[in-house]
Image (cartoon, coloured by chain):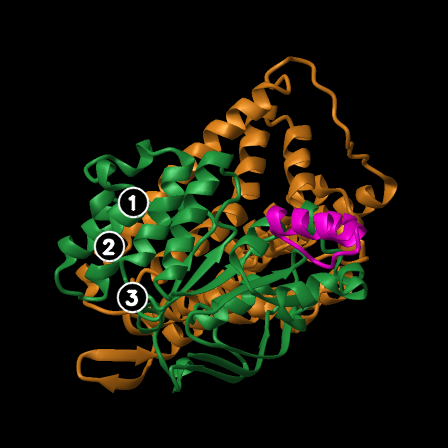
Chain colours: A orange, B green
Amino acid sequence: MIRYTMFLRRKSILHSIDPRSKIILSLFLFTVCIFFNNPIYTGTLFFFLIISLKIFGKIEIKKTLSFLKPMLPFVVMIMLLWILLGSEKGNVIYQIWKLKIKDVNIEMAFAMGFRVLAMILSTFLLLMTTEQRDLVLALVKMKLPYEYGLTIAIALRYVPTLASLAVSIMDAQKARGLELEKGNILEKIKKYIPILVPLIVKSIQLAQELAIAIETRAFGKPNRTFYRDLKFKFKDLVFLSAAVIFFVICLYLRIKGYGVLDI
Amino acid sequence: MLKVENLCYEYESGFKLKNINFEVKGGESIGIIGENGSGKTTLVKNLIGLLRLKSGRILLNGEDASKMSVAEIARTIGFVFQNPDNQIFASSVKEEVSFGPQNLKMDKIEEIVNDVLKKTDLFKYKESHPFKLSGGEKQRLALASILVMNPKILVLDEPTSGLDLRNARKLIEIVKNLQEEGRTLILISHDMELVSDLCERIILMKSGEIIADGGIKDIFDDSNLLEKTRLDLPEIAKLSKILEFGVVFDPGELYRKWRVSND
C-alpha cells in the first residue's frame, strides 16, 4: 500500500511546536551534519536524532528505521565508495588485487554513512512531526509568496493522488495482459508507455480542472487572510533558543577542530 | 467455472476480506453489491490476481488461480474498470482494442478486433482517436478492449456510472447480448435498477464479508437484510412490495398482478 505522507499524528512536544521553529531546527541540524567527519560525532548525532524523535516526538524507533530503510542502498553505496576509493593516507589493512582497504577510509565510510543518515533524519524530523498544510503555512509566514506556498501545497497534495492514479492505470493495463516484469530493459521501458500516456493525460486534465477551481475561488486577489494562523508561543521561543545554543556549541567545536578527521 | 474457498485478504490499513466462499457456474449473472468500502472491488481484484489472497483458494476451471499470472487469468476473467480514461493510451480505437490480444499473443487479431468493434457499435470509429470519443463510447471502448480477449467471465465495475440514459441503455443492450451468448457476468454496482435488469443472483457484502448469497428476489424481499445493508430497492420493486405482490421488476408483470387482484 502506498504511504501518502510522512506525517505521523502524535501528541508530543515536537508536534506542538510552531513549524517555523522546526524548519529552523531542521536547517541547523542539517548544517551541523556537514561540520563533522568523525564517525563518533556523526554517529552520536544520528543516534541523538533517533532518540530525540522517540522522546520528544513519540515516534517509535522501529517506525523511524522503517522510513530510513529505503535510503539504505544509497548509504551503503556511499560507504563502499569511501572504502574502495577514499584517501591515499592511512594503513592498508586488506588488499584485493589493486584495491587497498585502509583504516582511515573505513572510519570515513562510517562517518559519511552516519552523516547522510543524520542529514536525512534532520529533514524527516520536520516531515514526520508537521502536517503538510502547517509546513506550507509556515513557509508563507516566513515571507514565501503565497503563490509559491500554494504550489508546494498542491505538489504535496497531489503526490498521493497521482500515485493512486498510477496504480489504477497499472491495474487496468495488467488486466489487459500487460506483464511489466517480463522482457529485457528496453522491452520493460516500452511497456511503460501504456501507463505513462494515460497518467500524463489525466495529470494535465487534473491541472486544468484545478486551475479553474482555484480561479473561481478568487485565487490571486491581494491581501488574502488565513483560516488557520500560527502563533509563536513562549515554548517555541524556548525550543528555538535551545536549537540556537546547540548550533553554536557545534560550531564552536568545529572551529576548535573537534570531530574532524585528518585525511 | 469459478470457485472461491475461504478467501481471506488483509490490507495494511487493517481492512479485511473474511472467509469468502462462493461458486460461479458458467452462464450465471451475479451482482456483487454492498455499501462503499464493503470489499466488492477488493474481492474482484483478488479474483483477477491484482491482489494476492492471504489464505484460502480460488479455483478457475479447477486450477489454482493463485499460481497463475494476471495475464493468464485475463484469458478467463475480463475486468472492465470503472474509469475508461485510466486505460486509453493508443492513437486509434483499433490500436487500443488490439493491445490485449497482442499481450496475450493471440492469432488473427485484426479479425477479432473488427468483430468486437461491431459488437460494441464502435466499428465506425475504428480509425478515430480514442480521446475524441464521448463518455459512453469510451465506456464501450473499455468493454471492447476486454471483450477482445474473449474471457468466459466478464466483470463490470459500475459500467453505467456517469453515462446518460441513451448511452447507458446501449451498454446494457450490449451486455445482454453477451449474456445471451452464454458469457458469465459479474456486476459490481450501486445501481439496483441495473442489477435487477442484468442479474439473477446477488452476493451481498458488508465489512469484508458475504452476508447473503442468493436469488435476487429472495434477497430484495428480505426486509431485515435490506435495513441492515441500507440497500435501496428499484422503484418498481418498492411499489410491488407496497402493493404486497412481492418483489417484481417487470412493469407488465406488476400490472397483470394488479389486474388479477382487482378482478
* Circle 2 crowding by C-alpha within 10 Å: few under 14, some 14–19, many from 20: many
Residue at the image point whose x is 76% and y is 65% from the top: B222
Q: Which mark is residue A179?
A: 3
Residue furthest out toward the right: A234
Q: Residue B191 carries which label?
A: none
Between tags 1 and 2, which lies in front? 2
Q: Nearer the viewer, residue B9 or A44?
A: B9
- Could you tell me which secondary element the residue under label 2 belongs to? helix
Quadrant position of the C terminus of chain A in the picture:
bottom left
Q: Is residue B7 above or below residue A127?
A: below
Q: What stretch is highlighted in magenta?
A: B238-263
Q: Sequence-wise, which precedes: disc 1 or disc 2?
A: 1
Magenta: main secondary structure: helix
Residue A76 picture quarter: bottom left
Residue B30 position in % (x across, y down): 53, 65
Residue at which label 1 appears:
B89
